[in-house]
Structures are given as C-alpha cells and as structure tokens.
Image (cartoon, helix red, strand yellow):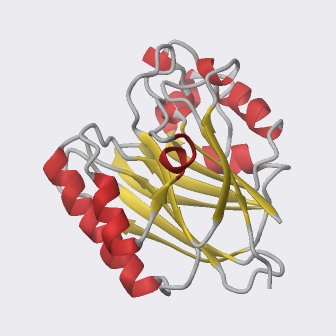
C-alpha cells in the first residue's frame, strides 16, 4: 500500500510578501493531489479583521475550508494567539484520527509554537501511525529546546516499534536537527535519504534554504521532492514537500 503525504507552510493563505490572498487557489491545487495526509503550518483558525476586509475569506477555519470534500478527518492546533486572531498547525487525513493533542513548544512569548500530535488508523496496518506536525523557532537555542521536547514527547507517547512521521517547518538553518532526531528517535529525513540532501523550499521564487522537512521511521520511502512548478511556486512563501511511502500491511 502506498501512502502519499504532503507538508507545506501556507503562510496564512497568502503569497510571498502578502501580495495576494491565495487560499482558494491553494485549495484547488491541494484537491488535485492524491495526498492521503497533509501537514500544514501557519494555518489561520480565526482572523476577524481580515474576515471583514477580504470578501473571499471563508466563514470557517482554514483547516476546515481546505479539508472540505477531500479529507474527511482534520485537526487544528492553535498556537499563536492574538487579539481577534490565531493560527497554528493542521493535519488533514483520509483516515480516521484516533487521537489528537496539541502541545506547546513555546520558549518565549514572541514566538508561540506548538506540536500537533495525531495517531491515525490505516486499514490493515498493524499499529497506528503517529504524526507530529511542528513549526520551530528562528533561533538555534530555542530550536534545541523544542527538539528536546519533541524527543521527550515521542519517548512518552509513541511506542518504539510504531511508525512515526515528524514534518513541518523546522527553520533549521544550521542543520542541527537531524543528528539529534537520528540518535534519540531513529528518524531519517526523507529528502536527504532519497536524494542525498535536504530539499530547498524557501523562498518560493528562488528556493535555496532547506527549512521544510519530513522525518520518518518504520516506513519504506519511495520518493521525496519539493514541488517548484506552478501553481505551487505562487501560493505561499514556501514550497510544498511531496513524499511517498510504502506500508507493510498486517
């Protein structure tokens, strides 16, 4: 059985530099994919000011809007909370979500971050698949603390023989995350395993920074790539990563 997964920082539904509201274009593009599971970062749960200002603003949360008709199961983790608005991470799934919890990864008030942890049951798969969706801080010291929290969460809530996917925007300029995740969680990074290096994903118009990642264990990797072609190159300031795994069914 093939499992197709996409991860993307959607920049709150705007293009790079906030020049266009792209949420409807993003939904159309996502609907054309055959992704089974979608990891999203910078997803708006509510913004009362923009809802009044932008006529095309949906009446529901962005995660609910994007999941409609395609992914019957979805969950949103509220992280950054301000007056009349909040945003965070979201997971859209074709498979039932058995468990979901949002855990704070915030290290200081200026950057409110979270870990959205889900467990989903895929038909004929022996054990639940655990999903971690994250968006980490911009500073190395804060990211190191957040990685320690992620590792602790996996040790306490994910059985060592369970398949695990950790995806999102890592802001890992210094490439320090992989050694820790490999040593303590036995996680491999998908693009690095498939192509020998992380995929460049930021900025969308000239990607050279390798910020978006998908780590995994107990899954067989088939392919990994960043989509640099239209429409994906015009929908956010980040490019999406598309990953395909092969599952061993019971």
- Residue shown at the point (37%, 65%) measured from the top left: 182
User: In the visual, does 105 lie left or right of 93?
Assistant: left
Where is residue 84, by image quadrant?
A: top left
Up-down: is 114 above or below 213? below
- Residue shown at the point (25%, 46%) measured from the top left: 111
User: In the visual, does 206 lie left or right of 172?
Assistant: right
In depth, the one of 218 and 46 nearer the eye is 218
Q: Position of residue 230 (x, y in %)?
A: 69, 18
Locate the C terminus by quadrant: bottom right
Where is residue 72, by image quadrant?
A: bottom right
Up-down: is 102 above or below 138? below
Q: Position of residue 47 (x, y in %)?
A: 49, 38
In depth, the one of 82 and 145 nearer the eye is 145
Locate the N terminus by quadrant: bottom right
Up-down: is 166 above or below 210? below
Up-down: is 17 above or below 176? above
Residue that protrudes farthest toward the left in the picture: 141
Where is residue 83, by image quadrant?
A: top left
Q: Position of residue 218 (x, y in %)?
A: 59, 73
């Amino acid at each position: 059985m093939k499992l197709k997964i996409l991860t993307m920082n959607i920049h709150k539904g705007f293009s790079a530099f906030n020049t266009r509201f792209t949420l409807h274009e993003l939904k159309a593009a996502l609907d054309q994919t055959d992704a089974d599971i979608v990891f999203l970062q910078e997803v708006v749960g509510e913004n009362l000011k923009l809802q009044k200002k932008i006529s095309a603003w949906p009446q529901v949360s962005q995660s609910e809007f994007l999941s409609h008709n395609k992914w019957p199961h979805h969950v949103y983790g509220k992280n950054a909370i301000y007056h009349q608005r909040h945003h965070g991470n979201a997971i859209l799934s074709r498979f039932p979500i058995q468990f979901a919890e949002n855990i704070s990864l915030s290290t200081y008030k200026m950057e409110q971050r979270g870990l959205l942890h889900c467990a989903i049951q895929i038909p004929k798969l022996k054990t639940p698949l655990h999903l971690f969706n994250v968006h980490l801080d911009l500073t190395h010291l804060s990211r190191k603390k957040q990685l320690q929290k992620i590792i602790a969460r996996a040790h306490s809530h994910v059985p060592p023989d369970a398949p695990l996917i950790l995806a999102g925007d890592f802001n890992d300029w210094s490439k320090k995350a992989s050694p820790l995740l490999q040593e303590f969680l036995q996680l491999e990074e998908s693009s690095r395993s498939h192509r020998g290096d992380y995929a460049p994903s930021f900025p969308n118009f000239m990607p050279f920074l390798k910020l978006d990642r998908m780590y995994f264990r107990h899954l067989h990797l088939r392919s990994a790539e960043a989509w640099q072609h239209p429409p994906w190159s015009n929908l956010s300031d980040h490019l999406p990563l598309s990953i395909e795994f092969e599952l061993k069914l019971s």
